[in-house]
Amino acid sequence: MVLMYLLHRFNLDAVMVHCNYQLRGEESDKDQRLVEKMSAFWNFECVSVRLEKGSDSNFQAWARDRRYEIFYDLKKEFDAGFVVTAHHQDDQIETLLQRILRGAGMPAWKGIQILENQLFRPLLNVSKKEILSFAETFNIPYRIDGSNEESTYARNFLRHNWFPELHNFFPGWRDNLLKLPKRASEYELMARKLLDGILFGDKAINRKAFLDLPEQIRPAIFYQFVNKLHIDLELSSSVELVLKDISKLQTGRAIQLSSKYEILRDRDKFLIQKLISDLFKPVKIEREDLEIIQSVHGIQLTIQRFAGDYDTGALYLDLNKLKFPITIRHWEDGEKFQPLGMEGTQLISDHLTNRKVSSAQKSQAFLIESFDGTICAVIFPHNTSDDQIGTVSETVRCSSETEQVLVIRNA
């Protein structure tokens, strides 16, 4: 209610959102009516949402997920700049203490941030006592959620059972706890500085420089590397076990970090990439599909009459030599094909090496397989120095008798 008053007082354009979980019957409805009434009084549009908890036993996690889902859906609908919440200093203290008790490392000691992407918490440095005093001074109506007085949840337990005793035994403990985000920021700056010294370009780290670091600080530097990449990789405590084995990793080999990502050694550097199963899923294509399909895995497939001419940056496969349906999929270790102009077969991995495709990028190459199991073409993850997007197999090469071709280009 204080946040709503401040938005009104500073004449800011905002939409109020109230989530009614219906836990306290009439009391919950009174909360909703107060928000709606004051929104109208201060000329704000108000959206009230009534929610009912399902069978999920973790109510707090469910409630948080649902309300933020609603917040961001409405933010998009109203084309708003930020989601603004009334988190205050006491919330920060409770968050920090919970993270410490749960064993979180120093990066988590930064606590809640005032501004995180499009989430804004303008009252984060204001204590609950100050907010209540402000509400009384300016006659701002508010209601107290009775469930906050119960010790059922972790935050309430800390608030009602621990905090009064901490005041008695450790005067000034609140101020000391609030210094932790500054310590965490100092730690982060040092870790970033060390990371800058071992980076290999923007998206990899130098293998030797990383392994030269003391083993105890490698996880901290690795966490900073992951954060720098801005990927949805949530590292667990098992990352320390992964990093113990990283020195034994052979070039071209990888260790899985999560269900989506792996760390790969590419000669003298380490990099993080998506797992193959996440990058490429096999796609089967019938001949008639080629009339409507736009692109698959970034390539365009079209049927054309063959005039004997070849465009740079395109592959030409004799259509009559293909057995449909064809499959576009990732290549597997040990697979071979017969590159155009070669009498025998060659391992796809060796062919990619010969075409200067790095170990890190090999996993992003894929192939086109005929229904009879013949590998008809290998598609590179990027154009080569001579502007080729891949290699056609000798088995589907065009000749003077070719009438129609399957043409492959970058989409």
Image (tube, grey):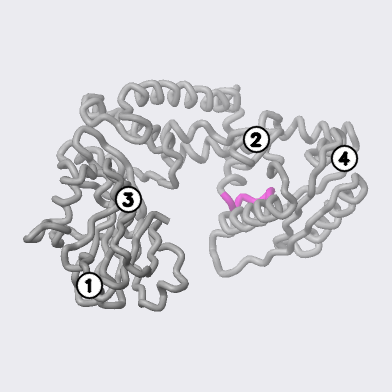
Residue located beneath label 2 in the image: 90
CB under 8 Å between discs 2 and 1: no
Is the C-beta separation of discs 2 and 3 under 8 Å? no
Q: Earlier in the sequence, mark 3 or mark 1?
A: 3
The residue closer to the viewer here, 14 or 127, is 14
Residue 101, position as x, y percentages in the image: 46, 39
Q: State which quadrant residue 46 falls in.
A: bottom right
Of the two numbered discs 3 and 4 on the same chain, state the one appearing first in sequence: 4
- Taken as a whole, is the magenta stretch helix, strand or loop? loop
Which residue shows up at 81% across the image and 57% down it? 32
Q: Residue at x 59, y 45 (%)?
A: 155
Does the rendering let one see residue 241? no
- In this orientation, does residue 215 appear? yes
Q: Label 2 amino acid?
A: Asp
Residue located beneath label 1 in the image: 401
Residue 140, label in figure: 4
**Above or below — where is 261 with respect to 220?**
below
**Which residue carries the number 3 mark?**
312
Q: Amino acid type of disc 1? A: Glu
Residue at the farthest right position = 41
Compute the Cα span from label 3 to label 4.
Answer: 72 Å
> What secondary structure is marked by label 1?
loop
Q: Can you say whether 221 is above or below 102 in the image?
A: above
